Amino acid sequence: MRKLFLCATAAAAFMACNNGGGTQGSKADSSLNAAFQAYQDRFIEQLWKENPEWATTVGYHKYDSLLPIPDSAAAQARLAFARQQLDSLKTFDKDKLTDANQIDLQLIENALQSTIWSINELKSNEWDPSSFNVSNTFAFILNENYAPLESRLRSIYSRLQHVPAYYAAAKKQISNPVPELTSLAIDQNNGGLGVIEKDFADSLQKTTIPAAEKAAMIARAKTAAAAIRDYAAWLKTLKPAQPRSFRLGKQLYSQKFNFDIQSTFSAEQIYDSAVARKAFVHSEMTKISRQLWPKYFGNATMPTDSLILISRMIDTLSVKHVKPEEFQSAIEKQIPELIAFIKEKDLLYIDPSKPLVVRKEPAYMAGVAGASISAPGPYDKGGNTYYNVGSLEGWPKDKAESYLREYNHYILQILDIHEAIPGHYTQLVYANQSPSLIKSLLSNGAMIEGWAVYTEQMMLENGYGNNEPEMWLMWYKWNLRAVCNTILDYNVHVNNMSREDAIHLLTKEAFQQQAEAEGKWKRVSVTSVQLTSYFTGYKEIIDLREAYKTKMGKEYNLKAFNEKFLSYGNSPVKYIRQLMLK
């Protein structure tokens, strides 16, 4: 259900300069708004009863001991819940709500409609075995210190009882699995076994729980682990004669885009914009490459083909990178330098009290992205925010070298801006301050990813990297990643782009290393639409900033724009735009 509701968990709270509540509409009805606030409270409480795992990961721990069984009855219950809540929303006249409440109503409505569409139309439970995985929530309960360890372990013990039934129901749901998603499910479920077999047992030894009770808890963990291992083994035996393609097709893709992205643009319009942006970026990169050529190649003949020229320059700059064993430590070192720059330039406030922990990416998360942020939810404001870094341990030398050339000296800094400061980590810290719990829970991924991409440009515009053309060239290369993510995702899922053509796009036109391109192909074969969120959100934020500059005139201030934008929580940019330009 968490996936169906498009939830991206928010981070710890921070007192932003604007409470994000919006202004009172001229027709706002105070009694109606009070009724809507009461409805939201009831809706959220019922939401957690229906989705206890989601509740746990956002810091609401009333239902930690529950593990719902994903059978057909549960799907019917979700449908009934969604339809009932949509009926309740019809009792509120949107035009008489405050600006902030209008956004919340639309977020709830979109989430409920998405749930119905996902169950009735998308039906991913039939073809996506990776949607069945218990390890993530178990790891969350084990690792977050929101309650005494003994209490958390007993919640895990209660949940473990239902793991065999969970996977038995999963087997009944799957009818025609996508091979790529089947492989992902096997890897991630096997990767999560250590949480139950080792981490849980190790944690028990740190407690004063009686020996007999510990023995019972370990025995139940072994039974649960056996069910997970059996599920992974069962998936390996599935060999459908005509397996379903991972490609969604235009109709499902367009519908999913509308629900997930919530943009003012259609999927096709965003694709067209990305194609135009690619041409612009290529033009800028050609200018910079011509400027840099004499510095690095002296009097050597400059290639006439602009893509070859750019590629030669990028390849030359990419040899400057850290050693494989220094990848994570280099990221850790970079964080305080980013904070210092933001303070010096007064770009926005960074709360020093919120922890950011750089850690090796947990095994149960492996297989999709090499770097990510895991943040506590709005109920768990004191929890850690993790910067998950993929490990290069055990990689063949040539593969590691290719990866490090991709994340070279320049790109690694841009990655840290995007993932951490002032990108995802900073945005998520602000997001929880929104007085609207709905905006934190029903987060808009395009706004979140778009902000991270926008901050890369914003930092360089303000002198980060000393305006070196090398840094700008590499940022344009990085920006091409967001642009080509959209082009790739749409072409693969709608236009049946082949793997060969996809790799060509990424390596020859986006100048990515082979290892990165192959990883992106794997990602586009196990996800859909999400890759468009980066460029869509970025485009909408840049468009909004230009419109806001025009509105404010001489009173425009970048820090004020950044903080005001972030103060509205994880809302779709189209709704933030309405409020900021009102």
Image (tube, helix red, strand yellow):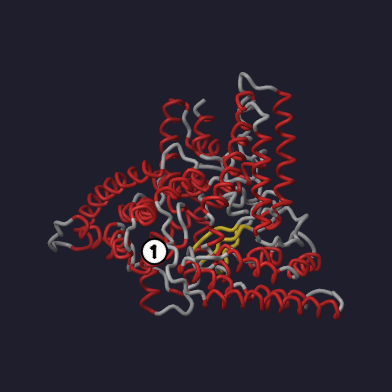
Q: Quadrant of residue 92?
A: top right
Name the residue furthest top: 26
Q: Position of residue 64 (x, y in %)?
A: 75, 60
In the figure, 434 relative to 194: above or below? above
Marker count (numbered):
1
In the figure, 104 relative to 78: above or below? above
Is residue 307 among what the camera can see? yes
In the figure, 50 relative to 137: above or below? above
Q: Categorize mark 1 by other alpha carbons within 10 Å: few (<14), some (14-19), many (20+).
A: many
Quadrant of the drawing holding the N terminus: bottom right
Which of the pair 291/145 is nearer the observer?
145
| Residue drawn at the location 72% of the way across and 74% of the way down | 200
Which of the pair 388/200 is nearer the observer?
200
Residue named by callout 1: 521
Is residue 329 among what the camera can see? no
Which of the pair 109/194 is nearer the observer?
109
25 vs 331, left or right, is: right
Q: Quadrant of residue 91?
A: top right
Q: Position of residue 9 (x, y in %)?
A: 61, 52
398 vs 84, left or right, is: left
